[in-house]
Amino acid sequence: MEGVADMGGAPGWGSLQPPRQDEPVFPEPWEGRAFALAILANRASGGNLDSFRHALERLDRAHYIDDGYYGRWLNAGELRLLDSAILAPGAVDARARNLRGEDVEEPPVPVPDKPDYAPTAEGTLRCLGTAPAFAVGQRVRARDMSPAGHTRLPRYVRGHAGVVDIVQPAGVLPDTNAHFLGENPQYVYSVRFDSHDLWGTDAEPFELTVEMFESYLETPS
């Protein structure tokens, strides 16, 4: 398990296998349509990558797990449209019932309320005029904090110490960007943690690397 990498969510257990030459992009046609609708819904709602991730986080169990991977994307896209009042609550269900032959009154179309948001540049990388706060080889600790909204700080590393392996370029901070509170760009650090420090002496021995924004880190006391 040595060298398992994490982009700020759950660790990627197992190895990636190359696709077969005849493997379809989407096993089922509806999955491709769901993927496209989710992307278009987030764009139509005035959202960004982080706001879409936050929509995924807010789904209930049925919409997140029971509907499967692409069902999850479709549900998050619908939630983004509800957030920005592109759709009225209950509109999708009412339309679906009418398409099945029922006679259901559909809610009136609301007045859109998109966020006042525009990125300062393409992509998520940004240039900073300040030096990174931490250096390669430095021991750091993940802050023990529980933000009320979106974050890419994994709960299982909070309060634990690791070592900086790589100083990455600065990127848009998801915690504020997801809520349209500004890009707040920060340096990103590849921080290496020992499994025993995270999960105790009985854990399988391996090292875990997590990509962490500067505000997630502090110097151990």
Image (spheres, helix red, strand yellow):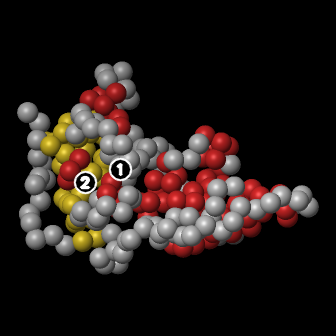
Relative image position of residue 30 (x, y in whole percent): 73, 64
Relative image position of residue 185 (x, y in whole percent): 23, 64
Q: Residue furthest top?
A: 202
Residue 216 lies left or right of residue 122; in this view the side is left
Seen from the viewer's position, the closer of residues 127 and 27 is 127
Crowding at mark 1 (Cα within 10 Å: few <14, some 14-19, many 20+): some
Q: For the residues labelled 2 and 1, say whether their Cβ atoms are less than 8 Å apart.
A: yes
Identify the element where label 2 is drawn: strand
User: Would you say residue 27 is visible in this rendering?
Assistant: no
Identify the element where label 1 is drawn: loop
In the image, residue 165 above or below residue 125:
above
Q: Which quadrant is the C terminus positioned in? A: top left
Q: Which residue is mark 1?
A: 152
Q: What's the amino acid at mark 1? A: Arg
Seen from the viewer's position, the closer of residues 95 and 76 is 95
Residue depicted at x 54% and y 70%: 112
Residue depicted at x 49% and y 68%: 113
Q: Which residue is mark 2?
A: 213
Residue depicted at x 56% and y 47%: 59
Q: Which quadrant is the N terminus positioned in? A: top left
Q: What's the amino acid at mark 2? A: Phe
Relative image position of residue 71 (x, y in whole percent): 66, 55
